[in-house]
Image: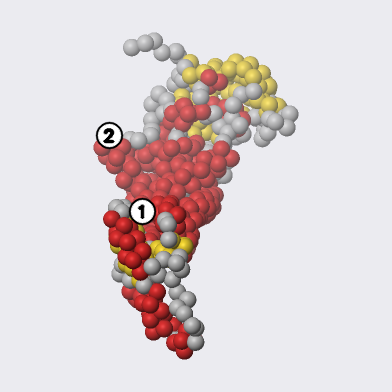
């Protein structure tokens, strides 16, 4: 058993040696693998971050409940009080038509234009903040429908439809990441198998001799599998470095943006486990591609 | 201990037909006993190399039966082929050495392949190199050696794993007479240590010198099987 392990370690070391002895070719392969893995990996990190940064946003969602023109200030206070008691509502702030008008004048600069109107065109409004119990967009929509159905209520509008759209987009992006990851994994397979194909034909004589003196196919395969695996792992590490580097370039910009939107601060890169997973995926793909390429070429030089 | 057959090689009505329809061997039958030494002669294209390839399973017989070392090769699965080859040492006309590795590593290759322990490899490689008279050249690259020396490295590699059967395909093809005789004497020596030796050659001189059995092939048929004389 120790002899078996020792032989594997020897093959591993000689594979490292082979790769180091051809630094240009190795760097090119490893670099291409790195960039290829960095693209879906980077997109994954991006989606994760946007998701995290916007996670709180639909909790800031606000529903504006507009009362009918005939509703009185008393109606406004009563409805607000009733709404406040509901468990799915965090707060319900009454805004009288007069307050709304003042705010509108102060903010919108329509001061004089509004003065020209004989009466206040704005209805009484209640600013409703949904409770934390409502997690889903579906729950929010249902709340809005219930509010719309209340007596003396003209309309209720959810102010965060864009957040929902964002989340939908994020879900789309998440699926895109996996699709991209699949495609780019195939690209890595092709790159590595092409490299291995070259390596196999460069060492064709050696393979033939080893076969003639009784080398088994696993024995012949082993150095190629190790080489593919190692290149994949190093490619994965390069992808990690690329992602981390790109993140550090944009991190200050993003935190500024995050502050503007009142979200969480800063970006998170790949966690250690995710970085290891990236390298494992690289190694696995390299191994698989080598196995595939070597198997194909070994059958090519098989005896009839 | 079970009783071992005294036969090392048995060909029964062996035909090798290539996909092109060309018959390289036709209805070959012969037996080689253990510890025997024999020459395989014939013009180029007579089927000598094909016959050797059938023994090492580089090719498979189209018809008939090949039994080597009590193993029916027709029934030997693809996965068992490497283990069969470890029991057959082969010397090639073009040496088939790895020129980017030292003499030591070349000779060690069949042992590495067979999973022999590190220390044992060193011992056996030196023993094999000693037998062919190249003990001082362990760390040299094969291309720096003369043709005769390279062939000795090839022989050392073929015997390093101590196979009971040694095959050689025109082992003296590119050598002058003196070196050629030396190489043949080496094979003769291994035969005297108990190794079964089958050598394909077109040089009649060796046959007359060593007086061993001769198998003569002509256009794929075995036309003579007996002691070195007429063919």
Residue B229 visible here:
no
Q: Chain of mark 2?
A: A
The residue that disc 2 covers is A1
| x, y percent for residue A93 | 32, 67
Residue furthest top in the image: B3
Residue B167 visible here:
yes
- The nearer-to-camera label among 1 and 2 is 1
Q: Secondary structure at mark 2?
A: loop
**Viewer-closest of B197 and A223:** A223
Q: Is A303 placed above or below B66 here?
A: below
Instruction: Tally the marks.
Output: 2
Which residue is located at x 48 percent, y 19 percent?
B71
| x, y percent for residue B18 | 68, 30
| Nearer-N-terminus badge (1/2) | 2
Which residue is located at x 33 percent, y 74 percent?
A259
- Do dots 1 and 2 share one subunit? yes
| x, y percent for residue B162 | 38, 30
Which residue is located at x 66 percent, y 35 percent?
B44
Q: Is residue A11 left or right of residue A199?
A: left
Which residue is located at x 38 percent, y 77 percent?
A98
The residue that disc 1 covers is A135
């Amino acid at each position: 058993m120790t002899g078996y392990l020792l032989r594997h370690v020897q093959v591993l070391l000689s594979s490292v040696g082979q790769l180091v002895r051809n630094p240009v070719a190795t760097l090119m392969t490893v670099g291409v693998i790195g960039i290829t893995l960095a693209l879906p990996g980077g997109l994954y990190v991006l989606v994760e971050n946007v998701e995290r940064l916007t996670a709180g946003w639909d909790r800031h969602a606000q529903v504006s409940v507009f009362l009918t023109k005939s509703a009185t200030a008393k109606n406004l206070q009563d409805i607000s009080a009733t709404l406040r008691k509901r468990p799915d509502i965090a707060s319900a702030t009454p805004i009288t038509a007069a307050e709304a008008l003042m705010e509108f004048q102060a903010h919108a600069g329509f001061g004089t234009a509004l003065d020209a109107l004989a009466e206040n065109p704005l209805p009484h409004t209640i600013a409703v903040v949904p409770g934390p119990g409502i997690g889903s967009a579906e729950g929010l929509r249902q709340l809005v429908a219930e509010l719309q159905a209340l007596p003396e209520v003209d309309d209720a509008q959810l102010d965060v439809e864009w957040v929902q759209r964002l989340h939908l987009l994020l879900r789309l992006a998440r699926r895109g990441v996996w699709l991209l990851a699949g495609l780019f994994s195939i690209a890595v397979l092709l790159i590595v198998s092409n490299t291995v194909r070259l390596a196999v034909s460069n060492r064709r004589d050696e393979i033939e001799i080893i076969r003639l003196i009784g080398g088994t196919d696993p024995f012949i395969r082993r150095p190629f599998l190790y080489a593919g695996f190692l290149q994949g792992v190093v490619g994965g590490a390069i992808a990690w470095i690329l992602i981390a580097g790109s993140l550090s370039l944009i991190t200050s910009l993003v935190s500024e943006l995050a502050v503007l939107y009142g979200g969480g601060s800063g970006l998170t890169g790949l966690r250690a486990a995710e970085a290891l997973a990236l390298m494992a995926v690289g190694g696995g793909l390299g191994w698989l591609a080598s196995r595939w390429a070597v198997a194909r070429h070994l059958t090519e030089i098989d005896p009839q | 201990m079970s009783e071992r057959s005294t036969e090392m090689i048995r060909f029964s009505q062996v035909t090798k037909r290539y996909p092109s329809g060309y018959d390289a061997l036709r209805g070959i039958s012969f037996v080689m006993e253990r510890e025997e030494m024999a020459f395989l002669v014939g013009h180029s294209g007579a089927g000598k190399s094909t016959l050797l390839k059938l023994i090492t399973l580089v090719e498979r017989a189209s018809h008939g039966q090949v039994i080597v070392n009590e193993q029916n090769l027709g029934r030997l699965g693809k996965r068992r082929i490497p283990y069969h080859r470890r029991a057959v040492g082969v010397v090639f006309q073009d040496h088939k050495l790895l020129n980017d590795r030292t003499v030591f590593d070349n000779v060690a290759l069949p042992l590495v392949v067979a999973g022999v322990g590190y220390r044992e490899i060193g011992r056996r490689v030196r023993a094999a190199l000693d037998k062919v008279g190249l003990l001082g050249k362990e760390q040299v690259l094969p291309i720096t050696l003369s043709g005769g020396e390279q062939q000795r490295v090839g022989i050392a590699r073929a015997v390093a794993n101590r196979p009971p059967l040694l095959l050689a395909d025109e082992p003296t093809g590119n050598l002058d007479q003196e070196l050629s005789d030396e190489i043949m004497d080496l094979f003769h020596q291994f035969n005297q240590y108990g190794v079964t030796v089958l050598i394909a050659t077109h040089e009649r001189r060796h046959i007359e010198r060593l007086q061993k059995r001769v198998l003569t092939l002509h256009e794929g048929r075995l036309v003579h099987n007996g002691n070195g004389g007429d063919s």
